[in-house]
Amino acid sequence: MNLEKNLPLKKIAVLTSGGDSPGMNAAIRSVVRSGVTQGLEVLGINHGYLGLLKKMSTPLQLRSVSNILQRGGTILKAGRCLDFLQEDHRKAAAQFLKTAGVEGLIVIGGDGSYRGALALGKEHQIPVVGVPGTIDNDIHGTEMTIGFDTAVNTALEAIDRIRDTAASLDRLFIVEVMGRESGHIAVEVGLAGGAEAILIPENPIPVEEIVQQIQRGIQRGKTSSILVAAEGQKPGRTYDLAEQIRKKSGFEAKVCILGHIQRGGSPTATDRNLASRMGAAAVQVLLQGKANLMISQQSHQIVMSSLEVASKGKRAVDKDLIKLAQVLAN
Ligand code: ADP
């Protein structure tokens, strides 16, 4: 309800912001179809916050979102917009939304996108709701983000393939996965792929210790090993690590950097369904006249949590999983 005018909500907008993640399309589809079915008009904003500044938008109907459920990326396009950090630009964005008759905005993205949404909401009284769309799974308040499961499974498939050649040729591999500030992908994929060591930005391990881990494996009869490393702030850093390992131990490590293949591709059933549930829940939040909330998954249930909390920093990894992976790789 539009509480001020005491009229039912008529029009909402949806955008995808920051990096893309597989399943964003499923979330857009869900927002559009659940919104339209309940009598709402839905405006799609292109290119994230840039679209608000450049007035790039498309009205979305039921058929606008046909055949996108299985597609990676985002039909609305995502991206970063530095201008949105400035108050005067957000004022122009709010003006555009108000002129278009938009009474609520759904932002699919990560913590940075939520900071933008909260600023817009607070400064211009536009109800905003967040949907967690990022492959990194590092948002406070939700145990799962849209795209994480697909990214993990993409990386896992690659690691399984590398395992075949590592075992056949008795080789040491370091596989670099995505994760600049957080190692959720590395930990999940390392555990699932039987990695001999998991290296993440939050838990730096000295090279000497990595070498000892490899040596302990050899003493137990291992003839090949796979280390999984998050890229950290410097994608490609794994080449440096391989060189350091070589200097310290003489071990020749092969490096495989998975890079952006982890962002693309058809979303898994888990991501499609998570996105479908979260998109519909976001529409419900706006219909109920609520705002400043993020749709989250807690104990496998779709619930609402604080957008403010979600906008602050990165959710930490469970370091016990790293220890478990180490024990299981014995
Ligand atoms: P993610 O949403 O994946 O964390 P970013 O951190 O790149 O991605 O943020 C996406 C966009 O959100 C930024 O390009 C910017 O437009 C907006 N944004 C981020 N932080 C702020 C902020 N403090 N104030 C206003 N807008 C912000």
Image (cartoon, rainbow, N blue to C red):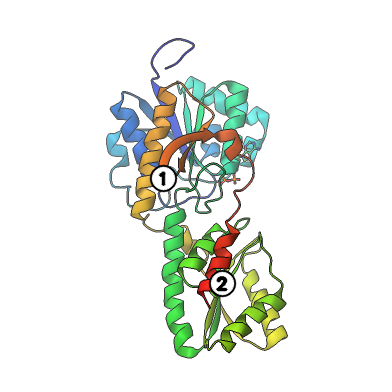
Q: Is residue 301 visible?
A: yes
Quadrant of the rendered image containing residue 300: top left
The image shows residue 13 at horizontal and vertical percentages of 44, 30
Residue 79's place in the image compared with 209, above or below, is: above
Label total for image: 2
The image shows residue 61 at horizontal and vertical percentages of 31, 33
Type of the residue with mark 2: Gln
Label 1 belongs to which residue?
300
Q: Depth check: 75 or 103 in front?
A: 103
Q: Residues within 10 Å of mark 2 (few under 14, many from 20)?
A: some
The residue under the point 52% across, 35% down is: 305
The image shows residue 40 at horizontal and vertical percentages of 35, 24
The residue under the point 44% across, 36% down is: 303
SS for callout 2: helix
Mark 2 CB lies closer than 8 A to ligand 1: no
Label pair 2/1, CB-CB below 8 angstroms? no
* Residue 326, disc: 2
Type of the residue with mark 1: His
Q: Residues within 10 Å of mark 1 (few under 14, many from 20)?
A: few
Residue 76's place in the image compared with 88, above or below, is: below
* Residue 191, disc: none
Give the quarter of the figure containing the N terminus: top left
Q: Is residue 286 left or right of residue 140?
A: left
Q: Is residue 257 left or right of residue 66?
A: right
SS for callout 1: loop
Residue 276's place in the image compared with 211, above or below, is: above
Report ligand 1 position as a quadrant. Answer: top right
Whole-number angstrom distance, CA of label 2 to CA of label 1:
27 Å
The residue under the point 50% across, 73% down is: 328
The image shows residue 58 at horizontal and vertical percentages of 40, 34
